[in-house]
Image (tube, helix red, strand yellow):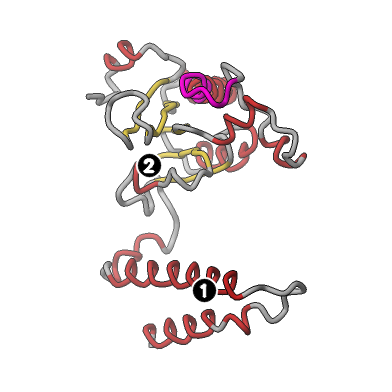
Amino acid sequence: MQKFSFIVLLAFLLNTTSLMAESPAPVNKSEKDQVREIIRHVLESNEKFVNGLPPEYFAHFIHGQKPMATMVTCADSRLHTHALDIHPDGDLFLVRNIGNQVSTAEGSIEYGIRHLHTPVLFIIGHSSCGAVEAAMSKPAHLEPSIWRELDTIKVAGHKSDDPAEVKASVESNVNHQVSSAIKKYATEVNAGHLTIIGGVYDFRNDYSQGSGRLVMINVNGETNLAEIKKMPVVNYK
């Protein structure tokens, strides 16, 4: 029955005439084909995911969640949880926004820390971050709603075409977000109930540790890598 339902759903969604019937503007054939392939990719990926797991896999998710960490990442499509947690289901209370900012997702983060009681808050930036580059170069064409979401990004330069300045600005922003979180959750941090970790997902290999490496650059405000490596809570190679 489950397989039959999937096939019926897939057939319905692949009927692009029905899918686009209420669209006020005409959609050309190439756009329809693109939409069809996107839907196919998502549904087939979900089918493989479901078929690769035993039914009991989901049983302990039904009545609630107990994630091990709250994680704030950039919404960039090049950064996804499989790079940070191979099996993120139930592990990560994930919050995403452009520029991995604290203020634009304050309620979600607070829920993870003060209601789900996760002992770790990760704030993860990444190489070549478009939000950081926009905050550096301030392009005139961006909509006001986007500018509002870039408001608390703190950069360290203005040359968005300079990889070194972009890297420094990505780090500056991660450190600024960690600092903001420490101020808000000072009670939990000082009591030892919360550790706030800032990191950079480095798919450019800017840190020469290998493309795709997560590099921790800040632990509870400490940004000296040598000191971070000495911390008992850090298992850093």
Identify the residue at image location x=50%, y=71%: 39
Q: Decide which of 33, 227 is in the foreground and name it.
A: 33
In the rendered image, which quarter contains the C terminus? top left
Name the spot of residue 42 as percent of width and height, x first: 45, 67
Q: Decide which of 96, 31 is in the foreground and name it.
A: 31
Name the spot of residue 55 as percent of width and height, x first: 30, 71
Residue matched to label 1? 36
Q: Quadrant of residue 96?
A: top right
Q: Nearer the viewer, mark 2 or mark 1?
A: 1
| Position of 10 relative to 79 (above/below) | below
Q: Could you tell me the amino acid type at mark 2?
A: Met
Q: Quadrant of residue 149?
A: top right
**Residue 187 appears in the rendering:** no
Magenta extent:
159-170
| Position of 193 relative to 88 (above/below) | above
Find the distance from the CA under tag 2 to the CA under tag 1: 37 Å
Name the spot of residue 91 as percent of width and height, x first: 37, 47
SS at circle 1: helix
Disc sitting over residue 183 in the figure:
none
| Position of 117 relative to 51 (above/below) | above
Disc sitting over residue 68 in the figure:
2
Identify the residue at image location x=32%, y=11%: 227
Q: Could you tell me the amino acid type at mark 1?
A: Arg
Q: Earlier in the sequence, mark 2 or mark 1?
A: 1
Q: Residues within 10 Å of mark 2 (few under 14, many from 20)?
A: some
Q: Quadrant of residue 31?
A: bottom right
Identify the residue at image location x=44%, y=19%: 220
